Amino acid sequence: MTDGPRAARLRDLHERDLAWMAGVERDLFGLSAWSETLIREDFRYGGRRYRGVWIDDRPVAYAVYGFDGDAFSLLNLAVLPEHRGEGLARMIMDDLLDEARSLDVPDVWLEVAVTNEAALALYRSYGFEDVRVRRRYYQPEDVDALVMRRAMRPDEAS
């Protein structure tokens, strides 16, 4: 997106951004949210990538994804409600899939609440396929999670 002063730009999150991210987690995910302490510990682990989207020098979306040498997974993707519909989730997904291609991974994996219709539609539009349901995965809400996979090598697609 490059529409003047409201141009969105993607960059890695820094440790100074984690308090903001924890606040968004609480607002968007309630009891399922990662705590700031957990986010900071995970961030320092180094096995994951924290990416954010900024508009007018303000963070408005983020994703957490990682590659452990074997599995490439999207762990979280969030867009502030007032910025939904602006293509920011797609901007992040494009970045994530570009990174997966550069690593030559066979698949990208994610889990999403079965009740999150917008996220399910986004992921399916990128070629993610349903693999299985994890019952009562999101606690304490007892919401099921759908495990999804996107084959990155056309000859290995199912």
Image (spheres, helix red, strand yellow):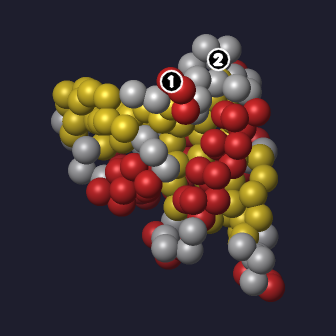
Q: Farthest bottom residue? A: 4
Mark linked to residue 121: none
Cα distance between the residues tagged 1 and 2: 20 Å
Which amino acid, mark 2? Asp
Taking the image as drawn, is residue 41 in sight? no
Which amino acid, mark 1? Glu
Name the secondary structure under disc 2.
loop
Q: Nearer the viewer, residue 104 or 24?
A: 104
Badge 2 crowding class, 10 Å Cα cut-off, few under 14, some 14 to 19, many 20 or more, is few
Residue 43's x, y, as percent? 68, 31
Q: Is residue 138 above or below residue 26?
A: above
Q: Nearer the viewer, residue 118 or 130?
A: 130
Q: Which residue is mark 2?
A: 68
149 left or right of 99? left
| N-term-proximal mark, 1 vs 2 | 2
The quadrant of the image that shows the C terminus is top left
Residue 36's x, y, as percent? 57, 40
Count all numbered tags in the image, as a single digit.
2
Q: Which residue is mark 1?
A: 156
Q: Nearer the viewer, mark 1 or mark 2?
A: 1
Residue visible at 55% across and 59% down in the picture: 89
Residue 47's x, y, as percent? 69, 23
Residue visible at 35% across and 51% down in the picture: 120
Taking the image as drawn, is residue 126 in sight? yes
Name the secondary structure under disc 1.
helix
Q: Nearer the viewer, residue 113 or 45?
A: 113
